[in-house]
Amino acid sequence: MRQRLIITEINFLHNSEVEKVLSALRVHFCRISCQRLDREVEKMTDYEKYAKYFTGLFIFGVLYGFVIFPKALKMSITKQLQLKPGTKTREEMYLPIPFDIEFTVTMWNITNPDEVQEGAIPIMKEVGPYHFIERKFKYNVEDDEEEDTMTFEEKNTFYFMANKTLPLTGQEIIVIPHIVIAAGLITVQRNSAPLLPMAMEGLTEVFDHPTTPFITATVYQVLFDGIPVNCDREAFQAQAVCQALEENLGESAVINDTHLALSLFRAQNGTSNGKFKVYRGLKNIHDVGRVVSFNGETDMDAFDGDECNEIKGTDGLFYPPFLKKEDVIWSFSSAICRSLGVYYKKDSSYQGVSLKRFSTTFGKNDPDCFCRDPDECHPYGTLDLSMCLGAPLILSKPHFLDADPNLLTKVQGLVPDEEKYDIIADFELFAGAPLYGRSGAQFNLDMEPVESYPPMANLPTAFLPIFWVSESFGLNKTFVNQFKALHIATKVSNFIKYVFSIVGMIGFGASVYLAYSSSDIPIEKEVIVVKEVQPSNMYPEGLEHFYDRNR
């Protein structure tokens, strides 16, 4: 900064007078300069105080927003989600699912069964949906403190919602593939061809010499009531068929000593789905709910490969917290003997809460060990259940959504629609909670002709739809409000974190700048040059004055 230099020459004759002048000058200049200096020092001191305040604000924003709040929230979530005996989460949210699952079944009716029997393309028509409430409950619970696991059995119970299903009643007549004759003979033909004649003879005897591979019955008979099977036969082949049916269908299929009941869901309604062992999450919250074993086995034995038999994920309704959208979220289904993973699809929301939507495509990233024949693997978008269920069944999304388009050329009447039939799960990832979910699964007969059995000799080759089911749930307002509170707390924390940090950083910088700027002031430097001179004729003797000249 530019400074002005004032040089003062003082010529004098008497030292005593000079001292008087210098003293007066010192007092004058000190009064002016010191006052100015005091003011500048006060300003610098104020800026330093502001810098300290803003530094504290910045440190608080960083510590609270990036350390204290996230750690406290994470500890709170961890404590709440642990499946410790006696906790609210375990006793009220995990063992009994605290909300009903809406379960619907839609049947596929074959409108031209006689033509299909002669090789024509099946023309399908939906009949449904039939609405049910599905309730899940875990019982026979045992804990292992050392392993940090709990073991339980689980059952699903279905309740028919007649009012919601109207005008349908369940008494509608449909035509579907015979779930024993068609599926049984195709399975024997593929896996045990030499036993085919004996199987045909036994089935013919049990079902009174049928002339068609299809069955005509009411919807409710097919779903729950069951189609009666007369096992009061003396032939060895017939007794073998009935014994095999009883073993596969379970005790719920037994009507009396001589009759069984064939149905799709009778065996699953109100009966145990098996024995599960899962982690409780007390030692590692990232494992909470993860299935350790099913029916005492740590992996399945349905497929030809360890990778395909691995049990991964939870039961599909309870997940560990602190998930990321890059994660593959796994769930295990004993009904299909395998685990399925869902992948991030897009952002979504539910009742005002911002979520991440996950979905899947059947067969995506599946290894070859899931194929019955690695050289001829099942079409894209489908799962081969034959190795799991022992029947030629194929799983797909409803209407063959996201599946090989060639499948739609083998049947008529199906119209894929992503908005209606896709599998979705909307997650709050930090808490690991799905707030809304919908899954759809269509079961299809992997149909082919059985030339040695006349009723099936001319059947076309196709994936013939039998029925499809949908499970959906959405948390009620009480549960959603808890997640809204979590989001509000997170938003407040983010506001404090970013606003305090940014304001503190900017304020600190400005204070430092102003403090340094105020220290560089234009102070006039007064240099007094004193010259002692000899008496001269220029000045009369005794004259008392001085002469200033600026140079």
Image (tube, rainbow, N blue to C red):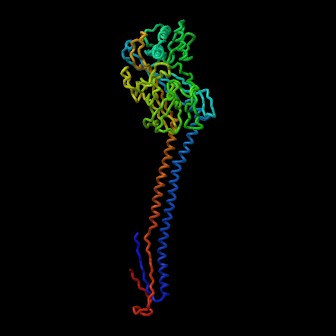
Q: Residue furthest right?
A: 145
For residue 350, say whether it is visible.
Answer: yes
x%, y% of residue 509? 46, 58
The answer to whether residue 523 is above or below residue 112 is below
**384 or 398: nearer the eye?**
384
Residue drawn where x is 50% and y is 59% of the image? 51
The answer to whether residue 465 is above or below residue 281 is above
The answer to whether residue 468 is above or below residue 354 is above
x%, y% of residue 156? 54, 24
Residue 410, by quadrant, is top left
Residue drawn where x is 54% and y is 9% of the image? 239
**163 or 350: nearer the eye?**
350
Q: Quadrant of the N terminus?
A: bottom left
Q: Quadrant of the C terminus?
A: bottom left
**293 or 485: nearer the eye?**
293
Give the total of numbered labels.
Answer: 0
Q: Residue furthest top?
A: 234
For residue 167, say whether it is visible.
Answer: no
The answer to whether residue 197 is above or below residue 33 is above
x%, y% of residue 105? 46, 22
x%, y% of residue 13? 46, 89
